[in-house]
Amino acid sequence: MTMKSTIAPPLVLKGMTWDHPRGVGGLRRSGLQLLDHHNVVIEWEARSLLAFGDQHIADFAPGFDLMVIDHPHVADAVAAGALLPLTDSPQNEALELESVGASHDSYKYHEAQWAFAIDAAAQVSAFRPDLCDGGPTYWSDVLELARRGKLLWPWKPVDAFSTFATLLAQWGEPLATRKRFVDRAAAGDVLEFMIRLADSVPGWCADANPIDVAEALIDGDDYSVGIGLYGYSNYSRSGFRRRLLAYDDITSFDGRATGSTLGGAGIAVSASSAHPEQAIAVAAALAGSELQSNEYTIGGGQPGNLRAWKSDRTNQLTHGFFRNTLRTLENAWVRPRVLGWPDLQFALSHIVRDAIIARKVDDTVLDRIERLPGVHLREDIR
């Protein structure tokens, strides 16, 4: 007589992430542990980095159980009924305590938690350790590097926005406060400074993102430093490319590495999931220190968990990437979660880039920036 197995077949969930080894590799590497501990298999699909930043979550949520998202999209996704709250997860409090900087809090909206941070990033500096001994500490150092022709800075629209926001925060006039959306004088000064930066780097940087700059730094010896770019720990791993990149804190005016625009990614649960309890449990496991410090990072992920950022193992794997940039993450500026922000950010990114291309900052540009909240936002910035 043949004995029938009493082990239930694994539950299959569908997940959406973004298309890069950092966005996919760690999640897939974590699959065996999720199968062992939760009897769940996740089928991951990946969208482009551009779609990750620009596409509304509600546009694709119905087809998935788990979604890797960008925190400024949370408010619009909640308003559209696309996400399930994670506030009552038994792991929520521990994950908040273990967050890299404000990564966990960046997914809060109206006192509820809507995603767990599985990835942490902010604008930092990258450098070739065989060509120089560190990233520029001060913006005056940047201008010297530019004079010598060794500098790269990506200012594709979304990256131009990030540098604009970072510089405003470092100027002492951060964007989108309760007091006002933008300080007009500071915005003018920052745009003039960004025009100076644009004049100091190759023309192709106008269409470059942080990955493009990282690849260019590795490809030849003409450039040694990239500034104002989101960190990718993959480039600090032996064997990822033919050369290593090292990363350092964000450049600043006072050397304190404050004000960098926070990026990263969180894992959310779709309101359309037919298996919400299992999906929430899996989301918490993916954000937890055990997976984040081991399989997730080994597979190419860039964790959002502080234990992973301080781990000897992950820092050995990445030649110190996490310890070298942690101060920047802990002092980063966080974009607001407010209805309409993704569309506002998209519009602002093009205004900023257009002003740099025109090499002109005038009242018309500043007026357009000041009017953006009235055009796009559907609630007050809190």
Image: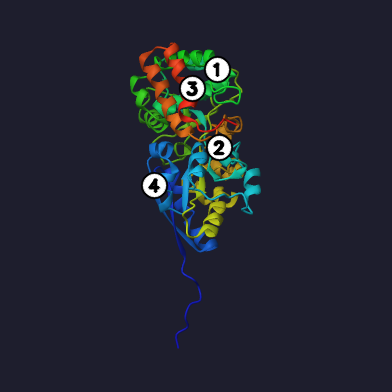
In the drawing, what numbered circle is on residue 284? Answer: none
Q: Amino acid at mark 4?
A: Ala
**Foreground of the two, 65 or 251:** 65
The disc, 4 or 3, on the residue closer to the chain's N-terminal end is 4
Q: Amino acid at mark 2?
A: Phe
Question: Is label 1 or label 2 in front?
Answer: 1
Q: Amino acid at mark 3?
A: Phe
Task: Give the image location of residue 80, x and y in percent.
Answer: 47, 44
In the drawing, what numbered circle is on residue 164? Answer: 3
Residue denoted by label 1? 183
**Proximity of marks 4 and 3: CB atoms separated by less than 8 Å:** no
Please give the count of numbered marks on the rendered protein: 4
Q: Residue lying farthest left?
A: 204
Q: Amino acid at mark 1?
A: Asp
| Residue drawn 47% across the image and 36% down it | 232
**Would you place residue 106 above or below residue 353 in this image?**
below
Question: Is label 4 or label 2 in front?
Answer: 4
In the drawing, what numbered circle is on residue 46? Answer: 4
Q: CA distance from mark 4 to mark 3?
A: 29 Å
| Residue drawn 45% across the image and 85% down it | 2
